[in-house]
Image (spheres, grey):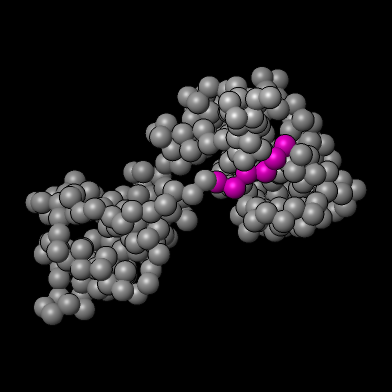
């Protein structure tokens, strides 16, 4: 099978059987096109079935020579591994050539988080009397209250809001559903928006919670811009994305005594090892522990 047909088949598999988002699909496709071009430009050209461990290792070496960051190299390898698992499953190949290929070591950076005070400043910076003010406040409150991914927020449905139970049903990665508690503060701002600004504007997608000016679902880019403006107005200088609110949600819950497994379930993480990054202690908390308990700090 040629590379083009194989990648198209993989794309359909990710879309129809695994239910991956458009952003994930585009990332896989871009990485694999790059690898396919590399294989086709070898002498002689390397087909899907002719790829060996050495082929992939030489490709990774080329990425290194091109000064690609270790995280980018690891992402390429992850895409290639996923593709060849699919190819083995579909019996396009008899042996997986990348099963034993080791990726570059990457430093796992701790996520940026906002303090509770900064979250309060962020929310308070939104002018509720401005156009879309109630919508924008509801968006940020919901991101922080539920720890949602930005795509999950864009796809949130009115039919999945259950204010009487203080729960939201979320459609996550791989089209997997999960139930997430929602705070009374977020519910209050959702109610202000749904029964005010949303009702008064144009509505095309009836069941979508957060709408744009044309009545369709709000985009990821719009949410980034809303958050960027709120941070600027609040005087927050950290580099903040919607995912930072998700990190802040998890970190604040953990510090408040929440169980790590419960946080994993609310975030929709496949593995608890992903959630364990939130067990880090912030500088202020670490300093307080040292000052209180280190023997050299006792009078």
Residue 52 locus on image (x, y percent): 13, 61
Residue 154 locus on image (x, y percent): 61, 47
Q: Quadrant of residue 176?
A: top left
**154 and 235: which one is in front?**
235
Whether residue 258 is situated above or below residue 274 in the rendered picture:
above
Residue 71 locus on image (x, y percent): 40, 58
**295 and 37: which one is in front?**
295
Whether residue 168 sits left or right of residue 87 in the image: it is right
Whether residue 229 is situated above or below residue 194 in the rendered picture:
below
Residue at image point 17% right, 77% down: 42
Tell me if I can see residue 93 in this picture: yes
Q: Is 157 colored magenta in this rendering? A: no
Q: Quadrant of residue 137?
A: top right
Whether residue 113 sits left or right of residue 24 in the image: it is right
Residue at image point 75% right, 26% down: 184
**36 and 92: which one is in front?**
36
Q: Quadrant of the N terminus?
A: bottom left
Residue at image point 57% right, 35% down: 281
Question: What's drawn in magenta, residue-wise?
Answer: 111-116
**139 and 112: which one is in front?**
112
Q: As drawn, which residue projects farthest toward the right?
A: 129
Residue at image point 31% right, 69% down: 64
Residue 188 locus on image (x, y percent): 79, 31
């Amino acid at each position: 099978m040629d590379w083009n047909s194989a990648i198209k088949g993989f794309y359909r598999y990710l879309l129809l059987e695994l239910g991956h988002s458009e952003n994930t699909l585009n990332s896989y496709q871009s990485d694999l096109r790059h690898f396919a071009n590399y294989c086709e430009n070898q002498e002689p050209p390397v087909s899907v079935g002719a790829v060996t461990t050495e082929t992939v290792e030489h490709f990774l070496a080329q990425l290194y020579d091109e000064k690609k960051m270790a995280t980018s190299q690891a992402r390429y390898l992850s895409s290639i591994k996923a593709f060849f698992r699919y190819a083995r499953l579909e019996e396009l190949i008899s042996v997986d050539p990348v099963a034993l290929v080791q990726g570059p070591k990457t430093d796992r950076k701790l996520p940026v988080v906002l303090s509770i005070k900064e979250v309060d400043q962020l929310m308070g910076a939104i002018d509720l009397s401005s156009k879309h003010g109630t919508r924008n406040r509801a968006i940020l409150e919901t991101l922080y209250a539920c720890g949602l991914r930005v795509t999950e927020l864009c796809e949130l449905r009115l039919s999945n809001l259950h204010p009487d139970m203080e729960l939201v049903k979320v459609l996550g990665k791989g089209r997997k559903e999960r139930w997430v508690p929602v705070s009374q503060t977020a519910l209050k701002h959702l109610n202000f928006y749904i029964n005010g600004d949303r009702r008064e504007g144009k509505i095309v997608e009836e069941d979508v919670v957060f709408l744009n000016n044309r009545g369709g679902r709000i985009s990821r880019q719009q949410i980034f811009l809303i958050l960027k403006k709120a941070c600027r107005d609040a005087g927050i200088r950290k580099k903040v994305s919607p995912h930072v609110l998700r990190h802040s949600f998890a970190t604040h819950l953990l510090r408040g005594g929440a169980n790590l497994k419960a946080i994993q379930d609310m975030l929709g993480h496949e593995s608890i090892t992903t959630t364990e990054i939130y067990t880090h202690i912030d500088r202020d908390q670490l300093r307080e522990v040292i000052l209180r308990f280190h023997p050299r700090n006792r009078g």
